[in-house]
Image (cartoon, rainbow, N blue to C red):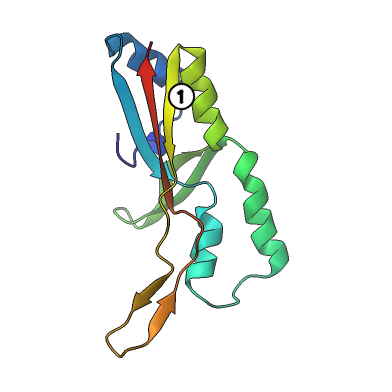
């Protein structure tokens, strides 16, 4: 499942369904945005748009699970429902139904990109996404 699990509001029910359709040894892998991505967005811009307090507020959201609504590029309104959760939320629910989490990858974010005018742009080292893999035992 690529970049879609954060649209699912009932993860416990979803992972029970995954377990039911997997054969023994079968794998479930998903990617999603990293919970610290909001901080990365501020860092990528390279501008001091937000105070340290505002960035810490974003970081504190990391351990909170729950729905939120954000801007929808298709409807041009704030009506896109997402479900925020820390990484442990997914790991715990996969484990509770008997899926063994055996892979966790936080890809290294490229920190500089060469521009056409021989300058470079610096990006955050905070991962933008992560991948998690589990198998039915």
Q: Picture quarter containing residue 103?
A: top left
Q: Picture quarter containing residue 134?
A: top left
- At horizontal 36% and vertical 40% (from top left) the residue drawn is 31
Residue identifier under label 1: 10
Crowding at label 1, few (<14), some or many (≥20) Cα neighbours within 10 Å? few
Can you say which quadrant of the picture contains the N terminus? Answer: top left
- At horizontal 56% and vertical 35% (from top left) the residue drawn is 66
Q: Position of residue 18 (x, y in %)?
A: 34, 17
- At horizontal 68% and vertical 70% (from top left) the residue drawn is 51
- At horizontal 39% and vertical 55% (from top left) the residue drawn is 77
Residue at the right extreme of this rendering: 53
- Vertical side of 99 occupied by 126: above or below: below
- Vertical side of 13 occupied by 67: above or below: below
- Vertical side of 106 occupied by 50: above or below: below
Most foreground residue, 60 or 96: 96
| Secondary-structure class at tag 1 | loop
């Amino acid at each position: 499942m690529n970049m879609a699990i954060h649209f699912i509001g009932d993860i416990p029910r979803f992972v029970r369904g995954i377990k039911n359709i997997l054969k023994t040894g079968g794998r479930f892998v998903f990617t999603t945005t990293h919970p610290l991505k909001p901080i990365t967005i501020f860092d990528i811009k390279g501008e001091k748009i937000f105070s340290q307090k505002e960035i810490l507020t974003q970081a504190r959201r990391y351990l909170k699970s729950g729905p939120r609504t954000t801007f929808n590029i298709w409807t041009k309104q704030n009506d896109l429902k997402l479900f925020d959760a820390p990484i442990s939320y997914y790991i715990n629910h996969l484990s509770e139904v008997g899926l063994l989490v055996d892979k966790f990858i936080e890809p290294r974010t490229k920190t500089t990109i060469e521009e056409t005018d021989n300058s470079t742009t610096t990006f955050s080292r905070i991962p933008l996404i992560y991948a998690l893999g589990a198998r039915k035992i």
